[in-house]
């Protein structure tokens, strides 16, 4: 890595590929549905040769892969404007095959449906023409590779921007050394937004938000993560536990110590003790590994 570069951008490659692919599929399917409804009633358009447009009113038909590449171009344009870092500083971080979390929690990510086509190979081929580098850890998730690189790079004096929609990576937020660009919000993570999302509160909840990144892991361990199929083991316990989380150092051990020294009530303590094995499992699963071997791809 060029040490004269002040900023290094770590991009969650799978997240980028899928967020560009799914709209392309939707555009193709919508176009085909509209065409299928149009051509039988139009004497100038032919299903056989696919001439959508002979009458001047036919719906547009979309080539999925062409739209996919257009979406990637648009995403690169948006990111370039928002993060103000040259593309040569962008590193696409691929997923490896991580098994430790699945061994701890067999249902981890088991809610994800199989998809008929994986666009990541096509995305990598196209993105490589833009000058980005690719890396991965063969036996780790992209989150862990990003965590390792962000930790090492910031310690070496680089400023790091993480581009991802994944809340697991919020544990790394440490501005100005490590900032996180939220692809879903199209803006950088802020303390205010963090406070609104952890814990995810109901409309009637008056529990104050948790605005310190050291509490992200605890919140995810207690209230789960539906996107990764991590179970919510302490529902409706926010009002009792959030004040203790806010005063803790962010570790599960410190939180449990605080719970034992205050009057939570027998019912709440009983639920906490009963849920402790699952909480400990969740805490291990939602944590990030910051010591995985990183391999640069040719």
Image: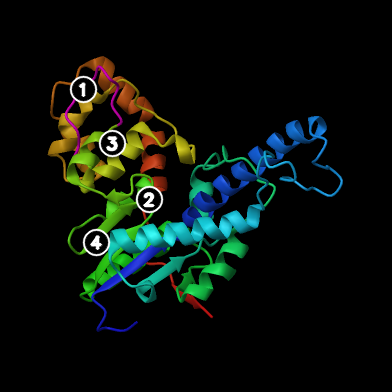
Q: Position of residue 165 (x, y in %)?
A: 39, 48
Residue located beneath label 4 in the image: 178
What SS does tag 3 mark? Answer: helix
Q: Nearer the viewer, mark 3 or mark 2?
A: 2
Residue at position x 19%, y 36% in the image = 245
Calculate the distance from the C-alpha at mark 2 to the C-alpha at mark 4: 16 Å
Q: Which sits in the foreground, 208 or 73?
A: 73
Q: Is residue 164 visible?
A: yes
Residue at position x 19%, y 25% in the image = 207
Residue at position x 73%, y 45% in the image = 52
Q: Which sits in the foreground, 49 or 275?
A: 49
What SS does tag 2 mark? Answer: loop
Q: Position of residue 281 (x, y in %)?
A: 41, 41
Disc number at residue 183?
Answer: 2
Residue 241 falls within the magenta-colored stretch: no
Give residue 132's quadrant in the image: bottom left
Q: Is residue 211 visible?
A: no
Q: Nearer the viewer, mark 1 or mark 4?
A: 4
Q: Position of residue 136 (x, y in %)?
A: 48, 68
How crowded is the residue under tag 4: few (<14 C-alpha within 10 Å), some, or many (20+)?
many
Residue located beneath label 3 in the image: 197
Calculate the distance from the C-alpha at mark 1 to the C-alpha at mark 4: 31 Å
């Amino acid at each position: 890595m060029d040490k004269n570069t002040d900023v290094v951008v770590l991009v969650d490659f799978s997240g980028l590929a899928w967020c560009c692919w799914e709209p392309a599929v939707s555009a193709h399917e919508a176009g085909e549905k509209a065409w299928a409804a149009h051509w039988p009633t139009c004497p100038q358009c032919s299903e056989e040769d696919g001439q959508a447009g002979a009458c001047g009113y036919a719906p547009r038909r979309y080539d999925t892969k062409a739209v996919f590449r257009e979406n990637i171009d648009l995403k690169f344009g948006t990111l370039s404007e928002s993060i103000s870092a040259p593309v040569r500083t962008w590193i696409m971080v691929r997923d490896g095959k991580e098994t430790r979390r699945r061994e701890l929690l067999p249902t981890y990510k088991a809610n994800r449906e199989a998809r008929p086509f994986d666009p990541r190979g096509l995305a990598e081929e196209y993105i490589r023409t833009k000058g980005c580098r690719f890396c991965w850890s063969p036996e780790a998730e992209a989150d862990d590779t990003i965590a390792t690189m962000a930790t090492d790079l910031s310690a070496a004096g680089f400023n790091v921007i993480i581009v991802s929609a994944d809340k697991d990576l919020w544990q790394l937020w440490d501005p100005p050394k490590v900032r996180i660009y939220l692809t879903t919000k199209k803006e950088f993570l802020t303390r205010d937004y963090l406070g609104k999302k952890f814990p995810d509160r109901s409309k009637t909840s008056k529990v104050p938000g948790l605005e310190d990144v050291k509490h992200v892991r605890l919140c995810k361990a207690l209230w789960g993560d539906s996107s990764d199929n991590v179970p919510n083991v302490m529902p409706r316990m926010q009002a009792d536990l959030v004040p203790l989380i806010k005063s803790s150092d962010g570790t599960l051990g410190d939180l449990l110590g605080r719970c034992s020294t205050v009057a939570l009530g027998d019912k709440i303590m009983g639920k906490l003790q009963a849920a402790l094995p699952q909480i400990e499992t969740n805490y291990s699963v939602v944590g990030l590994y910051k010591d995985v071997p990183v391999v640069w791809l040719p």
